[in-house]
Structure formats: C-alpha cells, structure tokens
Amino acid sequence: MVIKINENPTATAKIEGSKEYGSIRGKADFYDTYGGTVIVVELYGIPEELEEKSSGFYGFHIHEGGSCTGNEKDAFADTGMHYNPAGRPHPGHAGDLPPLISNKGVVWAAIYTGRFYPEDVIGKTIILHERADDFRTQPSGDSGAKIACGEIAAWKEEGKK
C-alpha cells in the first residue's frame, strides 16, 4: 500500500470548514488499491475549544450528495445522508469511516476500506462532524453537526485540464 500512496491518487477532495469553523482546511486523497481504497487525510486549523469539547475525536463519513452547499441551519445540507448503496444500517454504510483524531488542531490519517473504490465516490462529498461517531445511533451515529466538507473529484495533475 505504501507504493500506491507514493503514486498519484485516483480522486481528491479539498476540505474546508463551515462559516463557523472557517479555520479548518485540508484534503483527502483516494488511492485505488487491493480490493478497495486507501484514503489519506490531512486537516489543519481545528479550533482548540472544539478539540477540548470533542476530546479530539470526530466523525468522518462519505455522504451521497455532491455539493458542499446548504442553508442557514446546516451549511452542508446538500451533502445528504451517508453513502449507502447497499441500504445497510449504520455503521455498515459504505461511507462510514473510522473517527479522526486531532492533536493541537491537526489531523493526519491513512484509512483502508474495502467498501468502495475511489471511482465509486467521485461526485460525492466527505464530511467532518463535530464529535465522534457512536457506531450505534441510527441513521448516522449521532456525530453532530457537519463542520467541514470536501467535494470528491477525479484527480488531475496540476496545470492540466
């Protein structure tokens, strides 16, 4: 897998925080590998008070909607529900990922999942939630508000169209 993540990803998402959490920024890269996907995530700017409140644990999911837009109540309402093509209960959704852990406002993680390939999630969104997923509550793990979002797109080499 290390060889794969030294290559170009198949897909990528630039992640940005909501208006309330505008300091959050980063990316997620999706690599096609060995019957699934490796996701490499880098996030910066998680506020100290949020990290204290959540103990540094955050729900992290692929959502079925394709746009990081929403409304006054939910900045990312258009992301819809978790990506769940098989119609399984939570935490069996294809888009259910392990929680992320921050340290001094920074997250770095590599996640392997056999639940989808990168091309399956191009056009979907990736969401960071304000607290950890409890892996029980239906339909989405009671992980709170969506605080950061990225639209997953096919990877393009910089400078190419």
Image (cartoon, grey):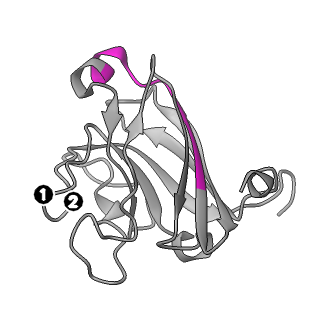
Task: Determine whether, in the image, residue 159 is placed left or right of residue 99.
Answer: right
Asked if 31 appears above or below 14 in the picture, the reply is below
Residue 148 is a magenta residue:
no
Secondary structure, mark 2, is loop
Residue 47 is a magenta residue:
yes
The amino acid beneath tag 2 is Ser
Quarter of the rendering containing residue 70: bottom left
If the image is split into quadrants, where does the N terminus sit?
A: bottom right
The mark lying in front, picked from 1 and 2, is 1
Q: Please report contact status of discs 1 and 2: CB closer than 8 Å, yes or no.
A: yes
Secondary structure, mark 1, is loop
Number of residues whose C-alpha sits closer than 10 Å to that of mark 1, classed few (under 14), some (14–19) or many (20 or more): few
CA distance separating discs 1 and 2:
6 Å
Q: Which residues are magenta?
A: 39-51
The amino acid beneath tag 1 is Thr
* Residue at position x 51%, y 73% in the image: 116
- Position in image of residue 53 (x %, y %): 22, 22
- Position in image of residue 83 (x %, y %): 37, 70
